[in-house]
Amino acid sequence: MSTPSVLPRGDAKSRLLDAALALIRAKGYAATSVADLCEAAGVTKGAFFHHFPSKDALAVAAAEHWTRMTGALFAAAPYHAPADPLDRLLAYVDFRAALLKGAVPEFTCLAGTMLQEAYDTHPDICAACAASITGHAATLEADIAEAMRTRGIVTDWTAGSLALHTQAVFQGAFILAKAKGGPEIAAESIAHLRRYITLLFKADQPRETPTMTKTTSAPDGLHSLTPHLVCAGATAAIEFYKKAFGAEEMVRLPGPGGKLMHARLSINGSSVMLVDEMPDWRSRSPKTLKGTPVTIHLVVDDVDAATARAVAAGATVVMPVADQFWGDRYGIVEDPFGHRWSLATPQKAMTPDEIIAAARTVMPM
């Protein structure tokens, strides 16, 4: 992922972090001085030491900044779109290959670059860089595990080990690119990785038929369509949803600075995904956007009791619970994070024609 040659004129701390991303990938950590960073960022040394007590402290913060930036990039990438989990994994490898553009420093990994220098001498930097690489690998595990399940693969290797192997290939490819001065050899290594994964899963063998599971592609615990909520404070949102809707936490992937890169809850047997907002990557919460056009619909056994529970946990009533013409007892609340939830208890089954007829009695059509 490239860094602009002309750094944006943000605050001094942000400019220093962006300068670190560019310079360390170009020169290495040891060869990058505080003076170099200040010159690239257009700040004084006084500003540097106001924000960071040392160059090592900046390196740790830069690794965390890199994790946030790349995490948002990969979360929004198109490789998540295919229905089949193996297709998603292969599309991810293709996406990584497509990032091999520009000069070598523009596509190599900051975490890997610093880790090669600091693994035995700077434990804090080593830990931050390792967390960046292994944390990203963890985002691949669900697709790998589902691809294994749908193809009946039972073996002594795990989804986690294969996810880490992909990162080993990418980091090794970056080293070869530095040795050769260009992306061609890295692209060859990534192409070999794709062939290896294809052979590993024997992708030409039949997949599960639709009669074997309720859906043909969604992992266990997920339906084909799942809401993914951006929250200003995802950790607090998880606790609210537990209190308000009886949510059960299924997955949590911590990110730098106490934020969450990913979480999944189960509410009444359906999944909801959450992530902390990242405005720099156009991932904004309803609070930042001053509202939401989306309402999440939740069917419950007792809508009055469910609404009272949500309000007690901190939700605000938008539409009071009442009997509705389509056969539900129904109301709407807004949670403390700006998301709206319609809660409903079906009272009687109605055909489409009956609903249309009932609607005409309450509104002009």
Image: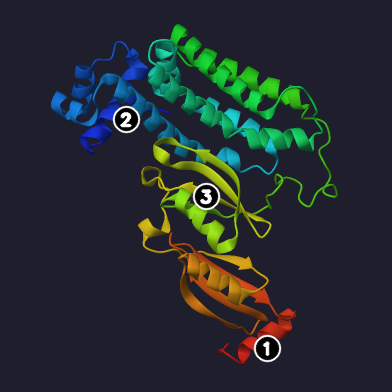
Secondary structure of residue under mark 2:
loop
Relative depth, front residue between 131 and 353: 131
Mark linked to residue 4: 2
Crowding at mark 1 (Cα within 10 Å: few <14, some 14-19, many 20+): few
Percent position of residue 281, x then y: 40, 43
Report which residue position mark 1 lands on: 357
Percent position of residue 46, x then y: 14, 27
Extreme-top residue of the structure: 179
Residue at the image position 49 percent from the left and 38 percent from the top? 254
Report which residue position mark 3 lands on: 274
Mark linked to residue 157: none
What amino acid is found at the position of numbered circle 2 in the picture? Pro
Tell me the CA gap for discs 2 and 1.
Answer: 60 Å
**Disc with the residue nearer the chain's start (2 vs 3):** 2
Tell me the CA gap for discs 2 and 3.
Answer: 30 Å
Crowding at mark 2 (Cα within 10 Å: few <14, some 14-19, many 20+): few
Mark 2 touching mark 1, by CB under 8 A? Answer: no
Q: How is the image coloured?
A: rainbow
Residue at the image position 56 percent from the left and 29 percent from the top? 137
